Amino acid sequence: MSDKPVIGFIGLGFMGHGMAKNIRQNGYELWVRGRKNRQPIDSLVSMGAQEASSPKQMAEVCDIIHICLSNSPQVEAVMRAEDGILAGARSGLIVVDTSTADPGSTEALAAELAAKGGHLVDAPLGGTPVQAEAGELGAMVGCAPEILEQVRPVIDCWAGSITHIGPIGSGHKN
């Protein structure tokens, strides 16, 4: 039995697939959720990842969930949908949003997750898909220092550098 947290990953596009692959290759139990393109899902499942039926299910089984989507409306949908992360969130859940997002949206979602006992981390990415595959992205992280220490080992799987910018929303403001 591993003492490592169970990781979820939503958004398996050009950046997300490489990030998720690096998390799995570092020995973490990984749950994934993709969209229409089966190739990245099938690739990660072949490495031992499990496919979640919904973001809600992922929130029920994972300790830390990464979101790597294009924009705030997509992140809001994954968080707030009837079968979204907030529907399955429990105390202690940490959501790491690596998307390009609006800081106001980030702060609102952080408050909604906090009401369920969870924590949102904003960690926008610096780099390219090649760097994502190599585990060499830059992460500008906004969250409380104690939450950063909980997620740092997982972010280390895909980031070559981690810069703590400040409290939640700080990463998306820079």
Image: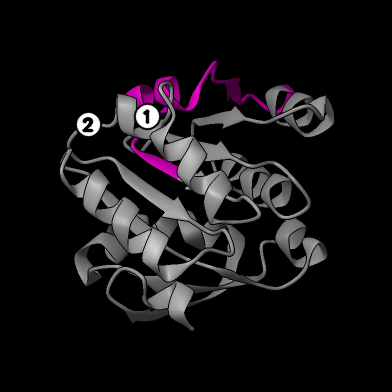
Q: Is residue 34 above or below residue 96?
A: above
Q: Nearer the viewer, residue 113 or 58?
A: 113
**Quadrant of residue 41 in the image?**
top right
Mark 1 touching mark 2, by CB under 8 A? yes
- Queried whether the magenta region covers residue 55, the answer comes back as yes
Q: What secondary structure is marked by label 2?
A: loop
**73 sits left or right of 62 in the view:** right
Residue range (magenta)? 46-65
Q: Nearer the viewer, residue 161 or 35?
A: 35
* Residue 17 % position (x, y): 72, 45
**88 sits left or right of 128 in the view:** left
The residue lying at 36 percent from left, 70 percent from top is: 169
Badge 1 crowding class, 10 Å Cα cut-off, few under 14, some 14 to 19, many 20 or more, is many
Residue 67 in sight from this viewpoint = no
**150 sits left or right of 141 in the view:** left
Q: Is residue 27 above or below residue 69?
A: above
The residue lying at 64 percent from left, 42 percent from top is: 11
Q: Is residue 91 above or below residue 170?
A: above
Residue that mark 1 sits on: 59
Residue that mark 2 sits on: 90
* Residue 130 % position (x, y): 82, 63
Report the disc number at residue 96. none
* Residue 92 % position (x, y): 20, 41
Q: What secondary structure is marked by label 1?
A: helix
**Quadrant of residue 4 in the image?**
top left
